[in-house]
């Protein structure tokens, strides 16, 4: 097997420096297992942000156990952990984090559940819950100062996510080619680069910038290995045109999506009298799930990275990840052979 060994692969004990991004809110159990079985790091997503915390935690534990039945390789769980003005993690986030920490106490589960990733806020609140669990903690950032603070809070690795990434992105846009080198220079821990990566060329570029791995979301959604999501979603990604993506205001700030009727309906709903933040959260969660689970391409909200405009085929994950690594090695070999005058 052809491999690229980095701090990321060594620390996790996996074959390839390729990670599946946290997606959802609908489940990604089968996709996560496929990515892990192919030598990357798959990521199980949470059931949703409007679930009653105890019910959501029980459902997430079920997802983790399903993933363990599908792979004997390491995988991650991703949880958004935006905090309130007092620095407290919301009840649903805390319940999900605790569910992961509790699951990792099971020796058999802990052989596979090796990583917790956090996103959409500072990691300090969640870090207090994760500390001592033996889970590797990866946190997603969109800026260099965020990266430095996260490392100071004690995380083990970072995902540096450029503005072109799908789903939640950043109020202050910093694109991948700027963000990646800046974060890699600013911290000593392994960095995973995300946003706009779709093949081995992106992996080679990330390594050249100083990163230890790449994370892909939209590319993995458009695959034959994501049966938990409706086929309409993958087909919509294939049909996406360059520059078609738009931003809307999601729970944790701007989110990159493909246009749908749901965005206009959300704008109308926001201005109705008596609509609370809880109502808006539930609306967004339900419409996200409607797109992912039910394939409603007009009534659903459709997170998607800008890379969708360059994706034209469905992949088989087991072939794609090793092929991506081989392509990256070929790119690096070609660059090494360049004549220097």
Image (spheres, rainbow, N blue to C red):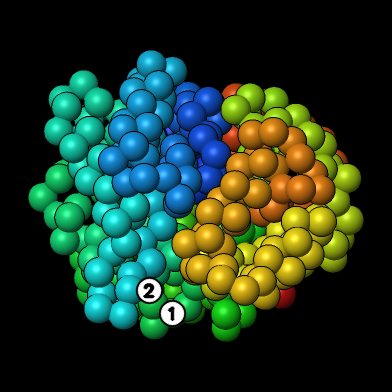
Q: Residue at x 37, y 32 (%)?
A: 59
In the displayed structure, 325 sits above or below 187; it is above
Name of the residue lying farthest toward the left:
132
Q: Residues within 10 Å of mark 2 (few under 14, many from 20)?
A: many
Question: Is residue 122 shown left or right of residue 205?
Answer: left
Which of these two is toward me, 162 or 288? 288
Between marks 1 and 2, how big is the CA–CA gap?
Answer: 5 Å
In the displayed structure, 91 sits above or below 313; it is below
Residue 337: quarter of image: bottom right
Q: Which residue is mark 1?
A: 144
Question: Is residue 279 shown left or right of residue 140?
Answer: right
Q: Which residue is mark 2?
A: 147
Q: Residue at x 69, y 25 (%)?
A: 224
Q: Residue at x 39, y 82 (%)?
A: 145
Give coordinates of residue 165: x percent, y percent: 63, 61
Give coordinates of residue 217: x percent, y percent: 60, 48
Q: Residues within 10 Å of mark 1 (few under 14, many from 20)?
A: many
Residue 187 in sight in this render: no
Give coordinates of residue 223: x percent, y percent: 70, 32
Question: Is residue 8 shown left or right of residue 231?
Answer: left
Does the CB distance between marks 1 and 2 fall below 8 Å? yes
Residue 297: quarter of image: top right
In the displayed structure, 178 sits above or below 255; it is below
Secondary structure at badge 2 equals helix
In the displayed structure, 321 sits above or below 248; it is above
Secondary structure at badge 1 equals helix
Which of these two is toward me, 53 or 134? 53
- Name the mark on residue 82: none
Q: How many marks?
A: 2
Q: Residue at x 61, y 80 (%)?
A: 173
Name of the residue lying farthest toward the front:
273
Residue 47 in sight in this render: yes
């Amino acid at each position: 097997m052809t491999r690229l060994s980095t701090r990321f692969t060594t620390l996790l004990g996996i074959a390839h420096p390729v990670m599946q991004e946290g997606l959802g809110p609908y489940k990604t159990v089968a996709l996560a297992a496929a990515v892990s079985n192919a030598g990357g790091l798959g990521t199980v997503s949470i059931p949703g942000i409007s679930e009653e915390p105890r019910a959501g935690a029980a459902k997430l534990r079920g997802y983790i156990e399903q993933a363990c039945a599908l792979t004997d390789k390491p995988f991650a769980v991703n949880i958004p952990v935006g905090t309130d003005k007092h620095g407290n993690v919301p009840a649903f986030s805390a319940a999900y984090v605790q569910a992961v920490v509790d699951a990792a106490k099971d020796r058999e589960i802990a052989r596979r559940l090796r990583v917790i990733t956090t996103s959409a806020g500072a990691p300090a609140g969640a870090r207090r819950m994760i500390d001592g669990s033996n889970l590797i903690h990866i946190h997603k950032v969109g800026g260099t100062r965020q990266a430095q603070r996260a490392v100071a809070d004690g995380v083990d690795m970072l995902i540096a996510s450029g503005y072109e990434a799908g789903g939640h992105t950043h109020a202050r846009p910093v694109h991948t080619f700027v963000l990646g080198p800046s974060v890699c220079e600013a911290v000593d821990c392994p960095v995973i680069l995300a946003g706009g990566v779709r093949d081995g060329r992106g992996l080679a570029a990330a390594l050249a910038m100083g990163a230890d791995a790449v994370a892909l979301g939209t590319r993995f959604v458009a695959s034959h290995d994501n049966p938990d999501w409706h086929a309409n979603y993958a087909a919509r990604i294939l049909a996406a045109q360059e520059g078609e993506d738009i931003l809307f205001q999601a729970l944790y700030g701007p989110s990159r999506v493909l246009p749908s009727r749901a965005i206009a309906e959300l704008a109308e709903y926001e201005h109705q009298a008596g609509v609370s933040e809880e109502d808006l959260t539930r609306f967004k969660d339900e419409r996200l799930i409607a797109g992912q689970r039910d394939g409603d391409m007009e009534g659903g909200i459709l997170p998607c990275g800008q890379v969708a405009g360059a994706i034209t085929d469905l992949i088989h994950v087991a072939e794609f990840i090793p092929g991506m690594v081989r392509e990256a090695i070929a790119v690096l070999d070609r660059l090494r052979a360049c004549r220097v005058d």
